[in-house]
Image: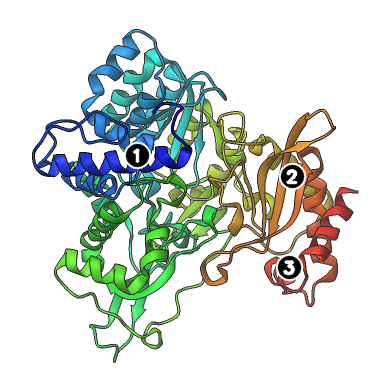
């Protein structure tokens, strides 16, 4: 549109044209080229993409404008563009923005300007893979990447420094290993998480592996479940000792024991919780609905399809499930899900649900007895999730020689070796140490989580992994803790390290250092977050802390807690709730001084 129109007139005309486009499409007429308009010939959609195309049509018919990502999906579905990905690999070319978005459907992220290379993120249902697969990923990361990999906060693996020419080698190399990266990025259902100790935990109510696996393969084999309004997270918690953080997911299935008199068959069910997205300051909420474990995939599918139809395709900041729930309310949303299912979901009063087994915030570190007599899982400490390929091969050999052959990734950026006999436990610990890794950790390091940060992500305001290591090194020498504490360091508002649920959370920010506009790495601090039974969103207490001052600021908060607790059992979260933000800021600044 020309400069003769005012901004309001331009917006009116865009809406008018969008309405005309939708009207013409609905009548089978060719559309006029324009932003957000359905391409000619798409009236009367059919095929697996129909549910998405119809949602886009309703958006434009209402006079709204699709965001660029929706236009890119509509112009060419990423799964139809694989030949071009191969062409770009042969030419050693990285993608432009539209294809950078599309290639994330294959698990490839072009991460410039942070790095002039691809990052590949896998899909590992329930976070469990075989030792030979883990070794194969190490070989692939060494041959095609930077010689290292990271464990992620979705019990997953990713590796970096991949040149454009290796894109197909990575995608197809993973398939050769019996793994995949399909749908691990962009507007798709992300890696399916479950209990890290599924099938081996003495206290678990059920084994989450078959349910996570069924949902994983359901997604992989249904193209209609790709191209959602935005990314989507699903988690299964079976009641094991290691927290799964299911309440941070769009859908959480929590195993519960239902008692007699509830109006349904007593036994183990899944409790359905919805709407978790901690970067937007919300934990998933209990719907009151119970789901038979064998029906979990069917119910999750219906929830996702309602979200596909109703999610916002015009504003990426408001396009998650939380915002449909905020707009509709839970009752209306669940009615739509039941309509999709053609059945009514049972609701049970909380009085008929037994308390869930207590979780252990440090059960992902060190040796712990399994339900199988004489066997143990051994939690390995990975410094902020990083492993070299040599260490990965050593861990794979350890799992095969002394364990049951499984590698179990956790949402705490580390892994477990399971099935280690009592008689071989000490030898397994020594082998971990020889690899330059640990099997025990201080309370600070055991609960330390950090996202990729500015060294690998263009959104991040600071080097989060570097800061996390600095915090651990500084505080371990100065503060003696007798309780677990979680410190989460994230680089930006996307909150991949979930800073709002940490006892102490840090979010990256550029901090001004002079009047000339020069900035350095820095953070805003939040405190008092939690998950599970102590679920809460942390409060901000301090802004613009330089990264170099962050370790001392964290120390100040921890020292204040250890010295001024109401009693020795008072948790850090409870301590922070007794104090106003100004007082907590003073503690932090006292440490920084």
Q: Which mark is residue 13?
A: 1
Q: Position of residue 33 (x, y in %)?
A: 24, 28
In three-dimensional space, the C-alpha distance between marks 2 and 1, rounded to whole angstroms, equals 54 Å
In the rendered structure, the answer to whether residue 173 lies left or right of residue 420 reads: left
Image quarter of residue 510: top right
- In this rendering, does residue 119 appear at all? yes
Residue at point 81%, 58% (across, down): 585
Q: Which residue is mark 2?
A: 471
Q: Position of residue 192 (x, y in %)?
A: 35, 50
Q: Which residue is mark 3?
A: 576
Disc with the residue nearer the chain's start (1 vs 3) = 1
Q: Which mark is residue 376?
A: none
Q: Please state, as top left, top right, bottom left or bottom right, where the N terminus lies in the image.
A: top left
Disc with the residue nearer the chain's start (3 vs 2) = 2
Q: Position of residue 3 (x, y in %)?
A: 46, 27
Residue at point 29%, 80% (across, down): 347
């Amino acid at each position: 549109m020309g400069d003769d129109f005012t901004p309001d007139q331009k917006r009116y005309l865009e809406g008018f044209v969008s309405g005309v486009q939708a009207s013409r499409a609905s009548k089978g007429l060719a559309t006029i080229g324009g932003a957000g308009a359905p391409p000619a010939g798409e009236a009367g959609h059919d095929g697996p993409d129909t549910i998405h195309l119809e949602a886009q049509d309703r958006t434009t018919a209402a006079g709204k404008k699709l965001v660029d990502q929706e236009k890119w999906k509509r112009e060419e579905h990423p799964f139809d563009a694989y030949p071009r990905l191969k062409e770009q690999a042969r030419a050693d070319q990285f993608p432009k923005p539209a294809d950078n978005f599309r290639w994330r459907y294959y698990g490839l992220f072009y991460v410039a300007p942070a790095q002039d290379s691809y990052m590949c993120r896998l899909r590992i249902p329930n976070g469990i893979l075989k030792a030979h697969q883990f070794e194969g990923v190490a070989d692939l990361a060494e041959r095609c990447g930077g010689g290292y990999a990271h464990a992620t906060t979705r019990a997953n693996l990713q590796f970096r420094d991949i040149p454009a020419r290796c894109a197909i080698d990575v995608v197809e190399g993973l398939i050769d290993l019996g793994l995949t990266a399909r749908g691990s990025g962009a507007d798709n259902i992300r890696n399916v998480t479950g209990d890290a100790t599924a099938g081996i935990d003495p206290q678990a109510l059920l084994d989450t592996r078959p349910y996570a696996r069924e949902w994983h393969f359901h997604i992989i084999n249904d193209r209609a479940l790709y191209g959602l309004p935005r990314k989507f997270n699903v988690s299964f918690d079976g009641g094991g000792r290691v927290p799964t953080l299911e309440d941070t997911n769009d859908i959480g299935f929590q195993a519960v024991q239902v008692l007699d008199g509830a109006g349904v068959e007593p036994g183990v069910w899944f409790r359905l919780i919805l709407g978790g997205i901690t970067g937007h300051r919300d934990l998933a909420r209990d719907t009151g609905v119970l789901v038979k474990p064998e029906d979990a995939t069917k119910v999750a599918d219906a929830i996702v399809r309602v979200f596909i139809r109703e999610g916002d395709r015009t504003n990426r900041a408001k396009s998650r499930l939380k915002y449909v729930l905020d707009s509709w309310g839970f009752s209306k949303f669940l009615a739509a899900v039941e309509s999709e299912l053609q059945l009514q979901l049972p609701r049970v009063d909380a009085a008929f649900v037994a308390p869930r087994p207590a979780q252990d915030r440090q059960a992902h570190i060190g040796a712990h007895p399994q339900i199988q007599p004489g066997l143990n899982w051994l939690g390995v400490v990975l410094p902020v999730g990083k492993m070299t390929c040599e260490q990965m091969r050593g861990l794979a050999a350890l799992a095969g020689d002394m364990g049951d052959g499984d590698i179990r990734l956790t949402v705490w950026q580390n892994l477990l070796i399971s099935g280690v006999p009592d008689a071989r436990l000490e030898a397994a610990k020594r082998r971990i140490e020889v690899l330059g890794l640990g099997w025990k950790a201080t309370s600070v390091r055991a609960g330390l989580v950090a996202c990729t940060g500015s060294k690998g992500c263009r959104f991040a305001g600071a080097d989060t992994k570097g800061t996390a290591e600095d915090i651990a090194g500084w505080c371990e020498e100065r503060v003696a803790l007798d309780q677990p504490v979680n410190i989460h360091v994230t680089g930006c508002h996307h909150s991949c390290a979930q800073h709002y649920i940490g006892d102490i959370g840090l979010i990256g920010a550029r901090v001004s250092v002079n009047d000339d506009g020069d900035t350095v790495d820095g953070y805003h601090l939040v405190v008092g977050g939690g998950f599970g039974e102590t679920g809460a969103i942390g409060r901000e207490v301090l802004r613009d802390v330089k990264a170099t001052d962050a370790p001392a600021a964290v120390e100040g908060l921890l020292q204040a807690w250890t010295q001024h607790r109401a009693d020795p059992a008072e948790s850090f979260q409870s301590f922070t709730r007794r104090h106003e933000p100004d007082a907590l800021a003073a503690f932090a600044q006292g440490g920084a001084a």
